[in-house]
Amino acid sequence: MDLRSLRYFVAVAEERHFGRAALRLHMTQPPLSRAIKQLESDLGAVLLHRSATGVSLTAAGSTLYDEARTLLDQAEHVRARVAAASGAAALTIGTLADSADEAGAGLVEAFRKLHPDVDVRVREADLTDPTTGLHGGLVDVALTRWPFDDTGISVHVLRSDAVGAVLRIDDPLAGRESLAVADLADRRWFRLPDDSDPVWRAYWSAASGELREGPVVRTVHECVQAVLWNRTIGLMPIGHALPAGLVCVPVTDMPRSSLVVAWSSANGDPLIRSFTDIAARFYGSASSAG
């Protein structure tokens, strides 16, 4: 069992699908499937229930997922400390869901023009930690969504987005131009795990109140699948790509969700300041162009 096989397993566990995990890992599916089978053989346990539509975790798989995330976080922390001790120019960017995709190639190009030789690494977090590892020192800077517990963290808002309710297209409310929180009364909601950032969890659960709670979700993919398969509902920023069969209807009385760049207030690394300045300028010019 090595770190690479654990990374493979975590990707499959979070995507719930070998094909999507392979795309995320920038590899083909057959070697990924072989690596997971080898991991199961090494551990002497079945980790995944496989079906034609995807995979789900066994009890052993759930245990390994939690342990694997911890081990990979520790390995990343070690790498960051070694890089810092060696003096090599490096930057670890934390992302949440598709926040890196929202940043787009333009931000990458703008950063690379000034810092062509910096070793950039990207760490994707699940929905329990919107700081993407800032509190734990696992990343230098984060492209993520706010609000969250920002104790000791500086935040610059890049863009603010309206929030909508994710519904099946056959839902009675799906054809509405907009909704209010009160329209969603008595509905079953997907929810974030209890160990999620409390400020973040409160924001995304605000509209559900004391309503019936549905399945626990850790990734954006799990959110949309919960709506498709279980007819639950939930909130997400307007503009996210959705699979066929779902719509996102604006909820007019929900506070807007902000795409932000965030960093540790105590970290004065000039490279971090440069990244945040470039991101702010890039989004400022993008907003002006729009």
Image (cartoon, grey):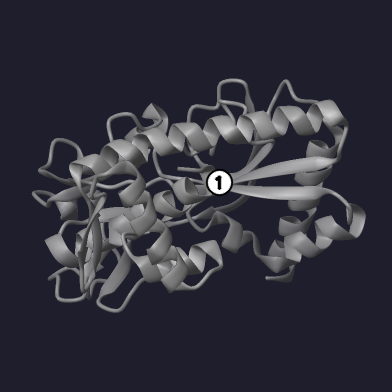
Which residue sits at x=89%, y=52%?
Answer: 117
Residue 145 shown left or right of residue 67 in the figure: right
Q: Amino acid at mark 1?
A: Thr
Q: Among all residues in the image, which is located at the extreme bottom?
A: 244
Q: In the rendered image of this protein, does residue 52 appear above or below residue 127?
A: below
Residue 236 position, x and y percent, is 37, 55
Residue 212: quadrant of the picture: top left
Residue 151: quadrant of the picture: top right
Callout 1: 10 Å neighbours few (<14), some, many (20+)? many
Per the image, label 1 sits on a secondary structure element best described as: strand
Tell me if residue 220 can be seen: no
Between residue 24 and residue 125, name the one nearer to us: 24
Residue 270 position, x and y percent, is 86, 34
Residue 147 position, x and y percent, is 48, 37
Which residue sits at x=84%, y=58%?
Answer: 112
Between residue 40 and residue 161, name the one nearer to us: 40
Q: In the rendered image of this protein, does residue 47 appear above or below residue 197?
A: below
Residue 88 shown left or right of residue 251 in the figure: right
Tally the numbered discs.
1
In the picture, which quadrant includes the C terminus? bottom right
Residue 93 shown left or right of residue 251 in the figure: right
Tell me if residue 33 can be seen: yes
- Residue position for label 1: 144
Which residue sits at x=23%, y=50%?
Answer: 46
Which residue sits at x=70%, y=24%?
Answer: 265
Residue 2 position, x and y percent, is 50, 43
Residue 171 shown left or right of residue 261 in the figure: left
